């Protein structure tokens, strides 16, 4: 009972102690965690600029500087890095765009219309997205083997086939995410627009989509990054070396199947890849927190 | 009349109408393009399916009444084709013995066994042999006819002519749709070759001998009456075992080529009852749970701690800290996993270097487990930090103030007020994080590949169910699609159950607190 009174008469000269108690430990925690977080990244940078490019000569801090690894990355015929990079983008960008567009259509229907089977369909979507595409990897492999017999452009070892799988895989999650956001857009807006003579398509394309830009950006990034990072399906689908994605291609440069001298080249490739993802993240930083917690965290 | 119609129609403007018509035209064009190969191959079921899908699309967009359907149909079709169908097929496959030795139907298996008994006949065709895998993964002989130089692909189902590149001797070096084996692979997989025979007729086939092959007639024949195959040269009789999809001799010897049959729940009961499978499976399962729970716990602890530390209005440098803390999250995770794999290298890796250790991270069970947890924690904590920070800032400030007035100090306030409120808000995300890590194929495959493996063991110390299943299906030694599918279904059931239970308990909690 007397405790609150005791703290209020704390002597004033203990200002450093006060600072340490209030802010100091916060900085300590932040710096400690930051060290843990940045060490591997520093290591990649150090390895990428290490002119020798081997694992054994790479330390946490660079001892010498050279662009040899980057040069090898683009000149070595054995490392079609440019192709891998392009493949990843060619697959991930359209897959993200199309799946987000299709999800937003479905989310609009779920958010704005009441129809028979709406609730069961939503629940089913929740259930099916717990069965991630790669769990069905055996079936996908067999299905696309068959598809390839009829349409070689979309079978195994084709970018189109892989893209289709990614598109299907991202649907459930993004539909739910977007439906949650669409629900927060007041229905009165729709009604006003309808009275002004707008059709449902005009409401969707002209009003809802622009208003939902933040969540579309987030879903798009999540789908894009998820696709870029996928290994299991890409390694199964794309086996020809020039057709590989970055994930599969860069894996071939690590010690298991390559001499350790490829480590610098691998680090350089990692660094270039991360420029893309880091730029995307940093430019949309302010949306990310709200987008990740969207729906789940109510104020 | 016109005005009224346009108000309910999807395309009220001319531009909208034009877009709609052109999209439908595109669909029609695509449908025709897709129909051609189906017609050419006589795949009438496929054609009917395709026509039905196309018809549904046209019906939905031409009619005016059912508006929600117009928005749902693209997603529904995509979902059916690439999520629901694969899931259904996975379940179907899990009840079969599909896999190596059971890839084809009974007729093809019979033919293959007959072809395996082929003896060279004088004057029969001879071929130069290269070996490869087809796009679907079937072992294929790539043959060059020594008489006229024509090129063929032959597998257990038969012979087809192909276009291929050949070297000076005439041997095939590359062919579209096939991965040609190198010398090393040829050496390693000799055994598979010896048993492969390409049927070319009722009782004739092609067999490999060294680096060439010959066509001849078989000494074996199939008799429908006894449902068996008789070898006249050796007198052996294989009787069909229709339950297991194999041909078996009287001595119990099983022919190498069997066929695909429905074996009911055998794959599932094998997991539960076969001691060779059950033991390792239980081990993997326990570790899998520990890995997922540990990943969530560690990332959440670090993320929450950091978020608490930075959640102080007026503190200097928070923006700076936050920007750099997102970095690990923004880095491509697959690449960073590979970097971590190198950092744990025993001889030259950073970790042993920095801390002066000489731990063999890939050789010891516990070290390997610690390794994957450390790396996975590094990958996951910034995400937890971000969502914890968001949730902390969204906490109702009045309950915290009330607690302060009531005399709750830092730790008590955190334990009694902040944490419960946070957990309610974040449980759905924690559950999905658990589900994600439960199936975190990348983390294991790219870090340890399941290692360490004890000699002759199919199960590694850090294997998750999903990496184990993947290796069962696509590993270098065997492919057992049926068993791998059964594990997939099993994983799904586990994740679904855990999620359902957790969601239910949190919903009850929410009722209590709100």
Image: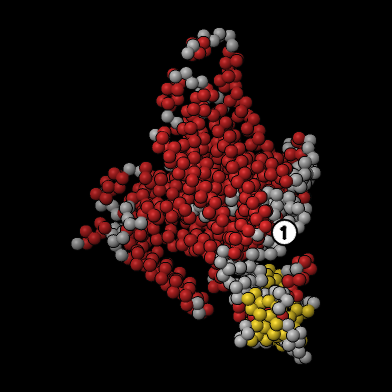
Along the line of sight, the residue nearer the viewer: A55 or B41:
B41
Quadrant in the picture for residue B200: bottom right
Residue bearing the label numbered 1? A77
Along the line of sight, the residue nearer the viewer: B276 or B175:
B276
Q: Position of residue B399 (x, y in %)?
A: 42, 26
**Residue at coordinates 70% horizontally, 82% vertically from top-left?**
B237
B471 on left or right of B394: right
Quadrant in the picture for residue B70: bottom left
**Residue at coordinates 56% horizontally, 70% vertically from top-left?**
B262
Q: Position of residue B207 (x, y in %)?
A: 73, 80
The image shows residue B138, relative to residue A62, as above or below, that is below
Q: Position of residue B370 (x, y in %)?
A: 69, 41
Q: Position of residue A236 (x, y in %)?
A: 62, 61
**Residue at coordinates 73% horizontally, 76% vertically from top-left?**
B251
Disc 1 is placed on an element classified as loop
A241 on left or right of B425: right
The image shows residue B304, relative to residue A267, as above or below, that is above
Residue count near mark 1 (Cα–Cα under 10 Å), binned few <14, some 14–19, many ≥20: few
Which image quarter holds the N terminus of chain B?
A: bottom left
Along the line of sight, the residue nearer the viewer: B445 or B36:
B445
Visible residue check, residue B493: yes
């Amino acid at each position: 009972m007397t405790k609150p009174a005791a703290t209020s008469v704390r002597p004033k000269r203990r200002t450093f102690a006060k600072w340490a108690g209030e802010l100091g430990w916060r900085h300590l925690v932040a710096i400690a965690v930051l060290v843990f977080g940045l060490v591997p990244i520093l290591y990649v940078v150090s390895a990428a600029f290490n002119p020798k490019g081997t694992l054994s000569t790479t330390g946490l801090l660079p001892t010498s500087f050279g662009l040899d690894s980057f040069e090898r990355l683009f000149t070595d015929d054995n490392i079609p890095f440019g192709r891998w990079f392009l493949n990843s983008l060619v697959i991930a960008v359209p897959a993200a765009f199309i799946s987000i567009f299709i999800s937003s259509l479905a989310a609009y229907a779920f958010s704005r219309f009441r129809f028979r089977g709406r609730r069961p369909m939503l629940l089913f979507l929740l259930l099916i997205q717990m069965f991630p595409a790669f769990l069905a990897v055996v079936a996908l492999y067999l299905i696309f083997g068959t598809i390839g017999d009829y349409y070689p452009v979309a079978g195994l070892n084709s970018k189109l086939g892989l893209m289709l799988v990614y598109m299907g895989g991202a649907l459930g999650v993004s539909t739910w995410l977007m439906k949650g956001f669409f629900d927060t857009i007041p229905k009165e807006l729709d009604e006003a627009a309808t009275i002004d003579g707008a059709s449902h398509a005009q409401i969707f394309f002209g009003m809802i989509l622009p208003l939902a830009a933040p969540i579309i950006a987030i879903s798009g990034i999540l789908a894009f990054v998820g696709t870029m990072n996928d290994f299991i399906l890409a390694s199964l689908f794309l086996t020809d070396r020039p057709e590989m994605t970055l994930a599969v291609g860069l894996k071939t440069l690590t010690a298991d199947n390559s001499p350790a001298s490829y480590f610098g080249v691998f680090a350089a490739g990692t660094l270039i890849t991360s420029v893309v993802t880091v730029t995307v993240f940093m430019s949309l930083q302010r949306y990310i927190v709200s987008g990740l917690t969207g729906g789940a965290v109510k104020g | 009349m016109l005005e009224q119609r346009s108000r309910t129609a999807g395309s009220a403007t001319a531009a909208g109408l034009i877009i709609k018509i052109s999209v439908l035209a595109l669909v029609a064009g695509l449908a025709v393009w897709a129909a051609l190969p189906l017609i050419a191959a006589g795949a009438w079921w496929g054609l009917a399916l395709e026509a039905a899908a196309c018809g549904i699309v046209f019906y939905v967009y031409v009619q005016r009444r059912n508006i929600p359907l117009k928005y749902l149909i693209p997603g529904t079709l995509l979902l059916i084709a690439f999520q629901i169908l694969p899931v259904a097929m996975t379940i179907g496959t899990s009840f079969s013995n599909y896999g190596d030795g059971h890839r084809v139907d009974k007729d093809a298996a019979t033919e293959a066994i007959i072809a395996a008994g082929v003896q060279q006949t004088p004057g029969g065709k001879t071929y130069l042999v290269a070996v490869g895998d087809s796009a679907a993964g079937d072992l294929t002989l790539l043959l060059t006819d020594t008489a006229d130089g024509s090129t063929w692909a032959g597998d257990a189902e038969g012979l087809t002519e192909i276009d291929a590149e050949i070297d000076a001797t005439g041997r095939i070096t590359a062919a579209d749709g096939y991965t040609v084996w190198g010398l090393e692979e040829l050496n390693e997989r000799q055994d598979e070759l010896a048993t492969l025979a390409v049927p070319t007729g009722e009782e004739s086939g092609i067999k490999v001998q060294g680096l060439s092959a010959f066509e001849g007639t078989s000494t074996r024949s199939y008799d429908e009456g006894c449902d068996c195959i008789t070898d006249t040269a050796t007198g052996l009789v294989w009787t069909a075992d229709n339950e297991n999809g194999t041909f078996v001799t009287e001595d119990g010897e099983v022919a190498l080529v069997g066929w695909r049959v429905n074996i009911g729940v055998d794959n599932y009961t094998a997991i539960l009852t076969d001691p060779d499978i059950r033991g390792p499976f239980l081990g993997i399962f326990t570790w899998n749970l520990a890995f997922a729970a540990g990943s969530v716990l560690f990332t959440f602890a670090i993320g929450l701690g950091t978020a608490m530390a930075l959640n102080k209005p007026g503190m200097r440098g928070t923006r700076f800290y936050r920007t750099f803390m997102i970095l690990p999250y923004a880095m491509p995770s697959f690449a960073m996993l590979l970097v971590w794999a190198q950092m744990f290298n025993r001889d030259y890796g950073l970790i042993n270097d920095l801390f002066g250790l000489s731990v063999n991270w890939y050789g010891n069970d516990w070290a390997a487990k610690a390794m994957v947890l450390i790396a996975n924690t590094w990958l996951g904590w910034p995400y937890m930090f971000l969502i914890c920070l968001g949730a902390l800032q969204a906490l109702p400030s009045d309950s915290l103030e009330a607690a302060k007035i009531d005399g709750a100090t830092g730790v008590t306030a955190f334990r009694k007020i902040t944490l419960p409120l946070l957990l309610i808000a974040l449980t759905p995300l924690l559950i999905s994080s658990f589900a994600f890590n439960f199936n975190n194929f990348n983390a294991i495959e790219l870090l340890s590949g399941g290692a360490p493996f004890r000699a002759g063991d199919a199960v590694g110390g850090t294997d998750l169910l999903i990496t184990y299943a993947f290796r069962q299906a696509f590993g270098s030694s065997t492919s057992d699609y049926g068993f791998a599918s059964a594990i997939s279904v099993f994983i799904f059931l586990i994740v679904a159950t855990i999620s359902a239970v957790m969601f239910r308990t949190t919903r009850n909690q929410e009722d209590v607190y709100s």
